[in-house]
Image (cartoon, grey):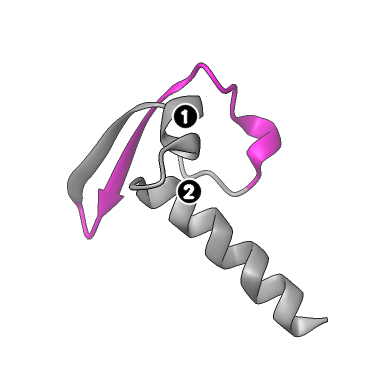
Amino acid sequence: MAIKHLDLVDPMDQVLILDEGVSVEYGRFRDLATNPDSRVLKFFKTKVDDDVKKK
């Protein structure tokens, strides 16, 4: 399932992050979202920064 809305993700869910079809990260969403080296955290920080710049 592709995640488009965070409301659909339970923090305890196991998630798999794919980059061009290759597994690059796997773990609990909560752990990935709070790990500074995680692509999950970097993705959402970039989205927030982009949204702020648009305003």
Res 29 label: 1
Q: Secondary structure at mark 1?
A: helix
Quarter that holds the C terminus: bottom right
Q: Residue furthest left?
A: 22
The range drawn in magenta is 5-21
Marks 2 and 1, how far apart at CA: 10 Å
Res 52 label: none
Residue 4 percent location from the top left of the image: 59, 49
Image quadrant assignment for residue 42: bottom left
Q: Amino acid at mark 1?
A: Phe
- Residue that carries the numbered disc 2 in the rendered image: 41
Check disc 1: other Cα within 10 Å, few if <14, some if 14-19, many if 20+: some
Q: Residue furthest bottom?
A: 54
Q: Left of 18 or right of it: where is 30?
A: right
Find out whether residue 16 is within the magenta segment.
yes
Image quadrant assignment for residue 54: bottom right
Q: Amino acid at mark 2?
A: Leu
Q: Is residue 20 above or below residue 54?
A: above
Q: Left of 18 or right of it: where is 11?
A: right
Q: Is residue 54 above or below residue 44?
A: below
Find out whether residue 48 is within the magenta segment.
no
* Residue at the image point whose x is 59% and y is 22% from the top: 10
Q: Nearer the viewer, residue 24 or 45?
A: 45
First-in-chain label (2 vs 1): 1
Image quadrant assignment for residue 16: top left
Residue 39 percent location from the top left of the image: 37, 51
Q: Residue furthest top?
A: 12
* Residue at the image point whose x is 49% and y is 36% from the top: 34
